Image: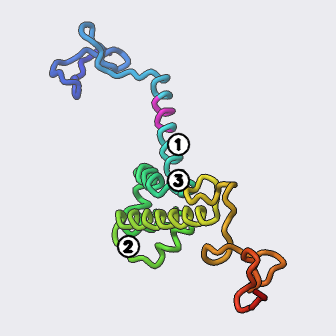
Amino acid sequence: MEGTHSGRGRGRGSRQPTSERGIGETSSGPNLELKVDPNVQIAAAMQQMTDLLAQERKEDEFIQLRQGTQTVAEYESQFTRLSKSAPELVMTEQRRIRRFVQGLNVEIQKDLAVAQINTFSEAVEKAQQVESAKLQVRNFQAKKRGFPGSSSGQGDKSTPPKFGRGAGGGRQSGVSRGAQSRGGQAGRGQRGNF
């Protein structure tokens, strides 16, 4: 049973002969029906799954992100990069601030808890200020203790360490406070025979 079949949807207005199976065939010109290779379909599906898994890994990495040993600037950079993978978690400025602060080290979080923070850039700036202040305190304490490499000179083994208040040094063992010897002179408040 051969007949004709219109070429609807194929961009041609001419009628095409039909075969016994009812499928239009053309003897001249390219076949416009798309034949997709099953291997290409599988590869595309696998690529789509790989992309989805990579996206989920980035979201998980963002959720688990903590400052750790990074500086605040390094943490902020990583936070901003990974937050693009999970925009629903930082939809509002307040959610973004909260998630950023929660990922900071506890010692910085404590100081930011009392701060009035309205913008993300404020949160980053204040966190960097706290980090800087804490670093200055640590450096001061290290110099005060005389750790090697400090510029105070106390780490030098040729200079004895200073203890106690002021620059007077510590007590000498076995000698009372007022009876320290000074080249044969008696201690303060005591009169010797001259």
Determine the residue positioned at 42% across, 66% down.
129
Q: Determine the residue located farthest toward the right in the rendered image.
A: 174
Q: Is residue 87 magenta?
A: no
Residue that carries the numbered disc 2 in the rendered image: 117
**Residue 106 place in picture, x, y as percent:** 57, 68
Determine the residue positioned at 51% across, 68% down.
108
Judging depth in this view, the residue of 13 and 66 nearest the camera is 66
Determine the residue positioned at 55% across, 65% down.
140
Q: Which mark is residue 53?
A: 1
- For label 1, the SS is helix
- Choose top left, top right, bottom left or bottom right for residue 27: top left
Q: Which mark is residue 170?
A: none
- For label 3, the SS is loop
Q: CA distance from mark 2 to mark 3?
A: 22 Å
Q: Residues within 10 Å of mark 1 (few under 14, many from 20)?
A: few
Work out whether mark 2 precedes mark 3 in sequence or the reverse, and give the earlier one.
3
Residue that carries the numbered disc 3 in the rendered image: 70
- Choose top left, top right, bottom left or bottom right for residue 119: bottom left
Q: Is residue 45 magenta?
A: yes
Q: Amino acid at mark 2?
A: Ile
- For label 2, the SS is loop
| Residue interval drawn in magenta | 44-49
Q: Residues within 10 Å of mark 3 (few under 14, many from 20)?
A: few
Judging depth in this view, the residue of 63 and 123 nearest the camera is 123
Q: CA distance from mark 1 to mark 2?
A: 35 Å
Q: Amino acid at mark 3?
A: Gln
- Choose top left, top right, bottom left or bottom right for residue 178: bottom right
Quadrant occupied by the C terminus: bottom right
Image marks 1 and 2: residues in contact by CB distance under 8 Å: no
Comparing marks 1 and 3, which lies closer to the viewer? 3
Judging depth in this view, the residue of 105 and 120 nearest the camera is 105
